[in-house]
Amino acid sequence: MAFQRIPPRILPHRWLLACLIISTVSGLCNTSLSQSPSSDSVQSLYAEADAAKARGDLEGAIEKLQNILEINPDLAPVYHNLGILFFEQGKLREAAQAFESGLLRDNNMTASLAPLGISYYQMGQLEKARDALQKATAAQSEDANARLYLGQTLFDLGQQEAGIAQLQELLRQSPNDSRALYELGQMHLKAAQGILRKLETTDPDSYLVHLIHAQMMEGMENYEGALAQYKKAAAKEPALPYAHYNIGNVYWQMRKWDDATREFSQELAANPYDCLAFGQLANILVRTHGDATKALTYATKALDLCPNLSQARMDFGLLLAENGDYEKAIEQYKRAVELSPEDDDVHLLLGRAYEKLGRTNEATAEFATARSLQNKSSEQERSHQEDVGSVH
């Protein structure tokens, strides 16, 4: 089976540049003016460089910074700004040389470490990239760009677990970082591909081969392919845990409610403690406006077994609201908000329940939160598409 390969190196684009340009040319370099014996000339060149950069004349700004270095070659911050301008032009070799020159003169100028490491990564010099990016994250542990590229660098060097750990740490700091989520997904996909190739070599007819194929296809939303592979895995290993749940869940994603219901029911016959199967059965009945009493039974059972199922809480609340019990529905929605605060749907449902009870201020607040989350989600999706679109 062939998988589409997505090369890891991403050329500089707007979100990265915005993070790297930490100040204007003049603002950053003024701290070192006292080192210059010709401060008036240097100050004038700073102003000219800053003006050139402001009007988009990067070549002009570079020329002025180089003129400053002819006057005083020991002004370390000038090298940093020169490196940033080269980086913005995609001149990665020149950028790296400038950053290295600045750090040679002032090894405490840690702001240069991240763009230096990223420049080396883009050029494929992974060992140099790793060294610079490790220093960058040590100096500033919350530098998202440095940690993102450190994770990619380690992964590309064959240190897959270490690379994944860096992305996991980044997501611990910023759970909604779409770049980190995307790259972590790519890492897991590549790792799975590697495991799959080994399995196909050692035991090509193993149920595990079909299972991994199924999971990867499901992740790529190839539901027909995933369904076929899950069924092959179940046929090879009749005692495979969660086999019916996996098949049912694919049917659920395909909106084939009858097939999904059959598989979830078979899963519960084999494993009566599968809270996810109970939750999905409840959700199907809610979506299809089926037997509300049965749906309530399923949702209650799911939450008895697994109290932290957000979707089951929402479905339970919906069923209560349909019976006019908005107070109890609100209790369920509030718990769902605690479990999934970024889910705009639950805020919308909570707002409607408040509205039914005449609690206008609370309803307005929830509706505003739902709109804000919807806008945020749309913006993240646009940003993600732009980032993915820049991959070469």
Image: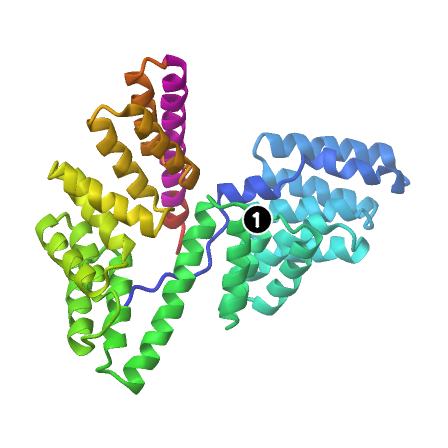
Location of residue 186 with respect to 44 vertically, above or below:
below
Q: Indicate the quadrant containing the C terminus: top left, top right, bottom left or bottom right.
A: bottom left
- Pick whichever, 77 or 70, lies toward us: 77
Pointer 1 residue:
144
**x and y percentages locating residue 276 in the rendered image:** 27, 53
**x and y percentages locating residue 127 in the rendered image:** 60, 69
**x and y percentages locating residue 105 in the rendered image:** 81, 54
Residue at 34% across, 81% down:
198
- Pick whichever, 205 or 392, lies toward us: 205
From the viewer's perspective, tell me whether residue 3 is left or right of residue 229.
right
Quarter of the image for residue 169 reads bottom right
Residue 2 seen by the camera: no
Location of residue 246 with respect to 375 vertically, above or below:
below
Location of residue 376 with respect to 204 vertically, above or below:
above
Amino acid type for the residue under numbered disc 1: Ala
Residue 276 seen by the camera: yes
Quarter of the image for residue 275 reads bottom left
Is residue 70 within the magenta segment?
A: no
From the viewer's perspective, tell me whether residue 110 is left or right of residue 9.
right
Residue at 40% across, 18% down:
362
Q: Would you call the spot at circle 1 few (<14 residues within 10 Å), some (14-19), or many (20 or more)?
A: many
Residue at 36% across, 69% down:
192
- Pick whichever, 287 or 374, lies toward us: 287
Colour convention: rainbow
Name the dominant secondary structure of the magenta segment: helix
User: What's drawn in magenta, residue-wise?
Assistant: 360-385
Secondary structure of residue under mark 1: helix
Is residue 384 within the magenta segment?
A: yes
Residue at 42% across, 63% down:
187
